Image (tube, rainbow, N blue to C red):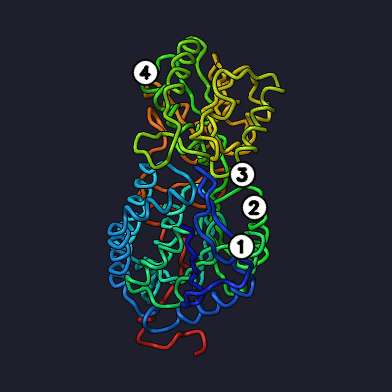
Amino acid sequence: MTEKIKSLIGGEWRDASGPEYATHYPADGSTVARLHAATAEDVDQAVRAAERARQQPGWARLRPHERAGMLNRIAAGIRARGEELAQLQRLDNGKPINETRALVSSAAGTFQYFAAAAETMEDAITPARGDYLSMSVHAPLGVVGAITPWNSPIASEAQKLAPALAAGCAVVFKPAEITPRMAIELARIAQEAGVPDGILSVLPGKGSIVGDALVRHPLVKRIAFTGGTSVGLGLAKIAAEKLMPVSLELGGKSPTIVCADADLDHAVAGVLYGIFSSSGESCIAGSRAFVHASVYEEFKSRLIAGAKALRVGDPCSEQTQMGPLVSISHRESVERYVQMGVEEGGKVLLGGQRPQGDVYAKGSYYLPTILEGLPNTARMCQEEIFGPVVALLPWTDEADLLAQCNDSVYGLASGIWTRDYRAAWRIGSALDTGTVWINTYKMFSISTPFGGTKLSGIGREKGRLGILEYTGQKSFYWGLNESPLPWSL
């Protein structure tokens, strides 16, 4: 049954002002929900309501421990509705249910973490160089915009909303057009937890309309964006004209390195997980696997066998490891990249096609795909595919390996598989990426900052100091002198 859902705009649950559209379940193409897209006028209403709400005593005068209590209630609300939220996210983007459950749990943990960070964050009394007391404090920036992607909505939204609320900001959310549900449900939970009307708005719709209006609005003081690189670059240009701070978590083409001494059991399992979990729809997917020539053939055969054994199917099933891609059009994009790889001289070792059978017929499924024979300079090895496709590249010389790994416009993440801790440190230090995993992959902690280099973005999310991204530093000087300042005497 298709559900009609409303947006939260300036404290009011209502239809947005734009045209009605539908969202679809990637597993079978069925319509999941209908809603109205937001417009620039809705953005203006939401931002102005947020600006008024953030100045009201009920929000502006909350002490950190009181905001922390609110965040803890949001965490409890997420956990109370955990299974429901996991099922809704499964319908939104087709992720297997075990994965959506993990994402919901992660979101609850994010709010709990930033509740603790808010309550324990300290400003500083700085060393004085005169007859005064000097202090450095942090004040909320004001109204901030958050723009999130479709691949892991509830986790991405929590990582922006929690520190922004902890800092005392008001937030206007623009979730991905095709996956609006998690932001809307988080807004309901936030209201129930006591977040005042107007402090949080959710505006689904097209990025070219809603996102653009949000970034350009003069009352918006910061943007936190996760998404595509080209969109992020355009956003950064607008922000620069406003001298507005941004955090941008963009694309990736992450290398994973298998050394000659690697434990192949761990390496094969890790590379499989790094590229094929989430159906490869992940900015940190390990899509370039550099394997030492001495173990290349053995690793390749074991990787193919492991990928063949992966369970591709219904996201409802707890046995499923890979669900469908997010849409038919996105699957077509992945297929074009694989064909491009073949035209560039690559050989498909596994996959490269849609799975056969009635269970897959209506969904946007694609098999795990492995290619070899491509140089690192090939487009398929340079451009982000955002799908379950990995290129195998043999290596022998470490200096050449590092040059190839870093020969990318992206620098989000990387992985190293070796028993030699010295080699791990040496290689990891030379990799130009924001995150380096050693003998593991795609492990995350809300307490550890995350972000990229080069065209993978700027700024960091997560970590105790993530709250400060939503504040401005302010200095106070308290005069302690008994006599007037001598200059004018």
| Label 4 Cα neighbours within 10 Å, binned few <14 / some 14-19 / many ≥20 | some
Q: How far apart are labels 3 and 2 at the CA level?
A: 11 Å
Precedes in sequence: disc 3 or disc 1: 1
Q: Is residue 120 above or below residue 449?
A: below
Q: Earlier in the sequence, mark 4 or mark 1?
A: 1
Identify residue type, mark 2.
Answer: Val
Q: Residues within 10 Å of mark 1 (few under 14, many from 20)?
A: many
Q: CA distance from mark 1 to mark 2?
A: 10 Å
Which residue position holds label 3? 455
CB-based contact (under 8 Å), mark 4 and mark 1 = no
- Residue at x-position 45% and y-position 50%: 91
Q: Name the residue that disc number 1 marks.
A: 211
Q: Nearer the viewer, residue 419 or 13?
A: 13
- For this orientation, the residue located farthest to the right is 343
Residue 450 in the image: x percent, y percent?
45, 47
- Residue on which disc 4 sits: 263
Query: What is the crowding at mark 3: few (fewer than 14 residues within 10 Å), some, or many (at least 20)?
Result: many
Q: CA distance from mark 3 to mark 4?
A: 32 Å
Q: Which mark is residue 231?
A: 2
Whether residue 432 is visible: no
